[in-house]
Amino acid sequence: MHTRTQHNYNVIRVPRSKAKTICPIFEDTGYPYHGLGIKVGDPFALTYKYYANKHFSFGVDLGRSASGLYSGYYREIFGEFTRPDTLQENQSVVYLTHKVNSDFVGEIKVLYHMKADKISQGLQVYAGLGWEWRNLNITYNYLLNDGILDNKIGFLTVNRFTYGVQGTVGIEYSYFKMPISAFMELETYMDLLKDPGFYKIQGGVGLRYIF
């Protein structure tokens, strides 16, 4: 004679605050989210992102430009800071070297996200538009040529503020056992104030803590 034994199984319920550490972070029912972290590249920056819903987010980056990538450009704009009307006849100014004292960058952007789970679980792609402010403090070393023999070396420290529009494309991955996301993005910046038409490819990689 056989007896049937009954077994009772309890369903383990995991609170959302803990579940997100073992599941993809961006659950559709959990928005809005915040992300705070660091971005390495151009610029090197602190980064904040507000995920309003599963499609739209707003980003803010504050940091410093990779000045070495702009060395040739900083040499080219030396002429912005020399005034021919202050030179005497036969005098000219020749660029020698420069030193970047600070090169701060601020960015804001609006981004549209799409899930790319078919490629990899937890992957998103995004694109958007933004605005960028740049503030450069730079010291130039130059040669004042008087056209005879009395040449002099001079130093000139200037502050240059400008701004422009920015386009961004990127990918973001969040399938970790921690509430973090990793991202990689490519940006195009176009100056609208000091040097209209000048553009630069920027970008970087980074991590954000999601809460």
Image: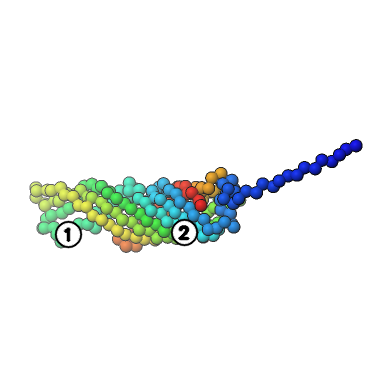
Residue 182, percent from left and from top:
50, 47
Q: Residue at x 45, y 57 (%)?
A: 59
Instruction: Say which element carries label 1.
Output: helix
Q: How many marks?
A: 2
As shown in the figure, which amino acid type bears the numbered disc 2?
Answer: Phe
Query: Residue at label 1?
Result: 84
Residue extending farthest top: 1
Residue 79, percent from left and from top:
23, 56
- Is mark 2 in CB contact (under 8 Å) with mark 1? no
Tag 1 or tag 2, which sits nearer the N-term?
Answer: 2
Residue 52, percent from left and from top:
51, 60
Q: Quadrant of residue 88?
A: bottom left
Distance of mark 2 from mark 1, alpha carbons? Answer: 45 Å
Instruction: Say which element carries label 2.
Output: strand
Q: Answer with left or right where residue 110 lies relative to residue 200.
A: right
Query: Residue at label 2?
Result: 58
Q: Residue at x 27, y 53 (%)?
A: 137
Residue 187, percent from left and from top:
43, 54
The quarter of the image holding the N terminus is top right
Residue 42 showing in the rendered view? no
